[in-house]
Image (tube, rainbow, N blue to C red):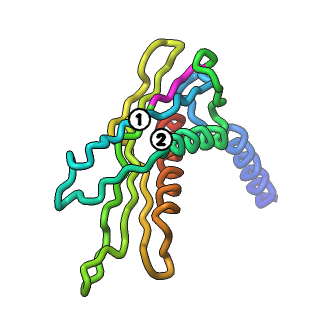
């Protein structure tokens, strides 16, 4: 009899805990009633004066035509997949606006062959300046300078991939980080 009461008490306690919940959510409440976002096409502000930043420490600064379009498309797609904010095609319809500029793409050497001193592994870095604006309240919510998405890639071996594949994965990483920065207010 006593055992039945203990089991019943445990079940009632378990039910009370599960009904009350802990308040955890995978969604952000960061922007209250803001539900629509416009992603302004990223500008290409990569410095085309290739000689300006070259040095022995940074010999891998590069330019890729159309990369800002890939970044814009990836950010739009990530917001659509996330679903927390609805992407709109006109800035006048938006509560929030993402503004960004591609400022650099570089590949950073990570590992060298010991004998020949050739690079065996790189990190592709896509670097942007970006901001989120609340157009309803006419204020900047946040600004990030030098925001980076990256992907490491080997030139040989079982984990080898092309530079183009690494660039696409770095752009996806950047887009994921932008969405996380926007919707997660941890």
Magenta region? 94-99
Q: Provide residue 150's location: percent of width, then percent of height.
A: 42, 55
Circles 2 and 1, Cβ within 8 Å, touching? The answer is yes
Taking the view exactly as shown, the residue that stands out farthest to the bottom is 115
Which residue lies at the image location 52% right of the left edge and 32% below the top edge? 41
Vertically, is 154 above or below 175? below
Query: In the rendered structure, does residue 48 fall within the stretch colored magenta?
Result: no
| Quarter the N terminus occupies | bottom right
Query: 10 Å neighbourhood of mark 2: few (<14), some, or many (≥20)?
Result: many
Residue 76 vs residue 69, the one in the foreground: 69
Q: Is residue 170 visible?
A: yes
Name the side, left or right, on which 58 lies relative to 125.
left
Foreground pick, 115 / 48: 48
Position of 23 relative to 119 (above/below): above
Is residue 95 inside the magenta stretch?
yes
- Residue holding disc 2: 68
């Amino acid at each position: 009899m006593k055992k039945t009461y203990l089991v019943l008490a445990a079940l009632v306690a378990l039910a009370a805990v599960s009904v009350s919940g802990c308040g955890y959510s995978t969604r952000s409440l960061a922007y209250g009633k803001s539900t629509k976002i416009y992603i302004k096409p990223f500008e290409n502000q990569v410095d085309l004066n290739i000689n300006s930043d070259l040095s022995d420490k940074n010999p891998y600064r590069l330019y890729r035509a159309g990369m800002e379009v890939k970044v814009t498309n990836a950010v739009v797609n990530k917001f659509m997949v996330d679903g927390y904010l609805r992407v709109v095609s006109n800035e006048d319809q938006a509560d929030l606006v993402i503004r960004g500029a591609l400022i650099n793409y570089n590949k950073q050497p990570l590992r060298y062959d010991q004998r020949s001193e050739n690079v065996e592994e790189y990190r592709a870095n896509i670097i942007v300046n970006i901001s989120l604006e609340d157009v309803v309240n006419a204020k900047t919510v946040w600004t990030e300078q030098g925001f980076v998405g990256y992907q490491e890639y080997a030139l040989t071996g079982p984990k080898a991939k092309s530079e183009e594949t690494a660039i696409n994965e770095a752009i996806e990483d950047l887009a994921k980080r932008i969405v996380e920065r926007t919707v997660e207010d941890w």
